[in-house]
Image (cartoon, rainbow, N blue to C red):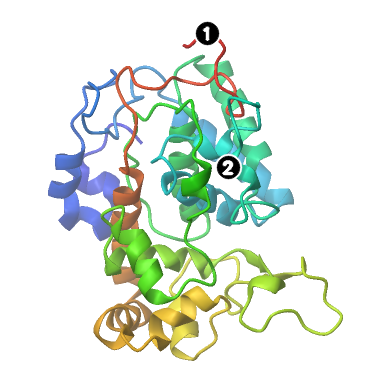
Amino acid sequence: MANSSCSSSLGLLLATHCALLLALVGAAHGHPPLAGSALSSLFYDESCPSAYDIVRRVIQDARVSDPRIPASLIRLHFHDCFVNGCDGSLLLDDDLPAIQSEKNVPANDNSARGFPVVDDIKSALEDACPGIVSCADILALAAEISVELAGGPRWRVLLGRRDGTTTNIESANNLPSFSDPLDKLQEKFRNFNLDDTDLVALQGAHTFGKVQCQFTRENCSAGQPEGALENLDQVTPNVFDNKYYGNLLHGRAQLPSDQVMLSDPSAPTTTAPIIQRFASNQQDFFKNFAMSMIKMGNISPLTGRDGEIRKNCRRVNSNGY
């Protein structure tokens, strides 16, 4: 993963965006960047060169018994970055009174999952290179690997985040919701410098995984418990592809917050043309999804001496690190 050229490592889909990635990359090779500096795809090349392969191996093992894991892991990265920035705050358990876990807010409670897999990844990385790889970077790597394993695009993950030592319950209570109207979704994304293309592309992660029927547009069928699971994409439920956008065009999106990107009165001049583009061109979707993931992964990262490298992703280090 570490030593290929920009064009070859990103693949043909992302080659034309090499200049942008090089602008985002800027940290020294294998050394911590200064606070506020850019992340780097080369960050662990010297300090933990096996990091990518370790994360990939744990996810591959986990998905054998739990095919939902790839979709669950990318959702953890999304819900982490939209609260306090990409700092691993979502992974913290309750440690009252200092830490109130974000896992218990409505958007995450009995919904966000995959935490034991993150624990397994962290344990394997601590065995290989103790105190080097942050929990925030684990989520970023796990998201890319999960998409790739499900047939989606590859991209060079920018790394060098450090872990936060606080949570933000107020912000966690304002995560994008399945019931949000389009203008509210756009506002929540704009708050993080993510535009309509980013919104439509990132919502495309709903092309795989499952959702509880109580959150769907159809709600639960007669006799179904609220926690019964439905495929988000009923065409290719375990594959990362562009079928999700075809579902939208045919009015078959599972979540209200998905279908509203086509049905809202403002959609014809904002999100609908992007949906039509992605539905007709999977390569275009893959390219934009990868770039939007890179943008999202750059939301307020802690770098340099800010934050810490947690020994355990579920709790803050007792004496710093």
Residue 269 sits above or below residue 64 on the image:
below
In terms of depth relative to the viewer, which is nearer, 236 or 253? 253
Residue 37 sits above or below residue 296 on the image:
above
Residue 59 sits above or below residue 26 on the image:
below
Percent x, y of residue 155: 33, 49
**Number of numbered tags placed on the structure image:** 2
Classed neighbour count for the residue bearing mark 2: other residues with Cα under 10 Å, few (<14), some (14–19), many (≥20) = many
Residue in the image at 54% along x and 66% along y? 239
Three-letter amino acid code at the position of disc 2: Glu
In terms of depth relative to the viewer, which is nearer, 5 or 137? 137
Cα separation, mark 2 vs mark 1, equals 23 Å
Percent x, y of residue 162: 40, 26
Where residue 305 sits, quadrant-wise, is top left
Q: Is residue 49 left or right of residue 2?
A: right
* The N terminus lies in quadrant: top left
Three-letter amino acid code at the position of disc 1: Asn
Q: Is residue 187 visible?
A: yes
Q: Is residue 41 left or right of residue 51?
A: left
Percent x, y of residue 282: 36, 73
Q: Is residue 243 visible?
A: no
Residue in the image at 27% along x and 33% along y? 39
Please give the label number shown on residue 319: 1
Residue in the image at 83% along x and 85% along y? 222
Q: Secondary structure at mark 1?
A: loop
Q: Which residue is mark 2?
A: 102
Percent x, y of residue 80: 48, 44
Residue in the image at 39% along x and 75% along y? 182
Q: Are marks 2 and 1 in contact (CB under 8 Å)?
A: no
